[in-house]
Image (cartoon, rainbow, N blue to C red):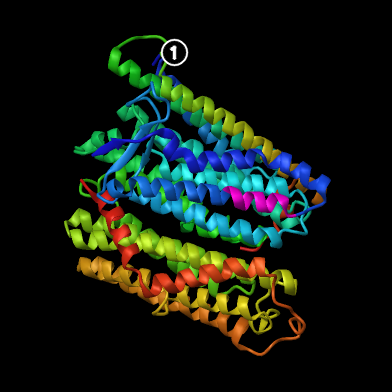
Amino acid sequence: MATGVGIAEVMGPVIALIVFSASMPILGYIEGKLKYKYLTGVAASVGFSFALIYLAYFLWRFWSSLAKGVALTSPLFPNFGRPLGVEIRVDVFSTFMALLFIGLGLLISIYSIKYMEHDTGLDRYYAMLLLLVAGMVGVAVAGDFFTLFVFWELMSISSYSLVSFRKYRWEPIEAGFKYLVMSTLGSLVALLGISLLYYYAGTLNFVLLSEAFARPDGTLKLYGYVILMLIFMGFGVTASIVPFHTWLPDAHPAAPSSISAMLSGLVIKAGVYAIARGSFMIFKPTAFDYGTLFVVFAVITTTVANIMALLQRDVKRLLAFSSTVNIGFILFGLGTAAYASHLGVAIAGILGLVGALMHILSHAIGKGLLFLAAGSFITRAKTRNIYELQGAGRAMPWTGVAFSVGLLSLSGAPPLAGFVSKFFLLMAGYSVGNAFMNVATSLMLVNSVFAAAYYLRLLQICVIRPRGEGVKELREASPVIVAPLVILMILLIIIGCYPWPLLDIARSAASALLQP
Amino acid sequence: MELTSPQAYIAFSIILLAIGVYCLISKRNMIKTVIGIEVTTIAVNTALLSLSWARVATISHITGAMVEPLAEALVIISIVIGGAIAALALSLVVNAYRHYKTLDLKKLRRLRW
């Protein structure tokens, strides 16, 4: 079921972001003339606020139909409809992701105003940041693979250049080159999958493709699995699923901390979103059995990344590996949902997707918070080694408290957001109730405890221990840096204590994805 | 299999894909890595075009070159994206050369695993 909606209404946030991005060079010129170095940062934050207000207006107008599970669609060019025209498609899942992208983008751009003040070329930085978020929102509202691919590449190219933004140092250049090569190869693999889809169905529209693959027979099923593997591998590079994750632990520490928060909180979630769209939307889990594959990859991802994270001494590298761990948890939720729907256990399917969506949210907020807080420690203490940062949380109390809440949330401590999402993921896994899922869920439970071990170790070293030598005369960061941290911390606590409205939204998004 | 049939083009794109991936895996020079990315991009673009041609050929039994608008538009956009990626990759190569005075990827690997 779908109803029409104006193209300007859906694309409003994206257009606002692109317009502000395009005006950045002029603002940068004015900034140079005025000798006021915060102009571009403030303008970028205003741009994000515009996009957020526009999205809120859109939700206010269309929420009543979206909440009923209706997908709003609109052709991008009015005279070209299906099957060949490109299309925008918005449902609850899309708006959930778009709201997350723009909201966290706004907080990160506010943080960047002060954090990036000593860097040059800030007009380029904010132009790329706005384009990155515009690309991700475009991926979230895409209604066919054409639109998804174009916005995907917009997002990828801006994130490559943001990773290597500090080009006067060796590390960002090397990590950026590695990220570029791996991620480009990944999107080419995904494009190969898309071209096979086009060969079979003659369209790239999600709805028409799902009709084409609704009742697969023998050869079509095999063909579908090949395409599914290509799409999973292609988008899995950006989502950092384990055999394809090696760019991530290099790119996250090399990027400026605001960009690490962006990559870890949002860009890899866009990869997960593309995988979820490509699998659940087109290949219905009742007909195709890919849940097993997802669950196996999820367990491998979590285990390998956990072991790697335990060995790290660099705080940003540790957090980067922990992002891969959490992608494993999200993938586990998706896999459980697919597996359960294939077996016909509808309730476990819904629970798995609700857990995955809640974990996307709680990990985006929590890991964004951790990277921003770590960035504020690192700017003051000039080191990334966790033993040299000993007791830094005591020297900078606000940042320290926010850092602790983020760590506790990711380790799954009860009154915080991470507990809610992990609880739903594990409950979904156990409620399928066969031997395979019981073993897999138990492994995830063990991994979750493992992860809590190094989060608590980080908490103990950086916040609880007395101040070390390097952090004796640290001062608290500026209020502009602390404000986004406090907002994210409060969000974590609110979601943890009162998750019901969000669970309702996640449930309607899940049933929209799983409907036959 | 005639040389002007879509199957020949699909086979050609598979060979190109193999060459591109081999180049990406085996070459140590950064410029050659960028060339590998470009060859792979061209291979996938060719695959997309020839697959859409094969589809039209099976449906309508028309011989000769055929136009599929959506596939062509996607390929044109993909070529533009490939150009942007090549430009960015080459600018990274220039910066890497300024740091190291070499383009050898093996000498660059200061990143730990």
Q: Quadrant of the N terminus of chain A?
A: top left
**Left or right of A416 in this view: A403:** right
The amino acid type, in three-letter code, at marker 1 is Thr
- Residue that lies at the very extreme toward the left in this rendered image: A344
Magenta run includes residue A237: no
- Specify whether A60 is left or right of B75: left
Q: Identify the residue at image location x=32%, y=26%.
A: A83
Q: Main secondary structure of the magenta part?
A: helix
Horizontally, is A461 left or right of B7 in the view? right
Q: Which percent across, then down, holds residue A434? A: 20, 67
Q: Output the chain of dot 1.
A: B
Picture quadrant of residue B69? top left
**Percent coordinates x, y for residue B54 in the rendering:** 36, 20
Q: Which residue is mark 1?
A: B4
Give, as a single range, the part of the protein colored magenta.
Answer: A38-47
Q: Residue furthest top?
A: B63
What residue is shown at x 33% (from left), y 55% (from top)?
Answer: A293
On the question of residue A317 being in view, the answer is no
The image quadrant that residue A255 belongs to is: bottom right
Instruction: Please tell me how crowded label 1 is: few (under 14), some (14-19), or many (20+) other residues with Cα within 10 Å.
Output: few
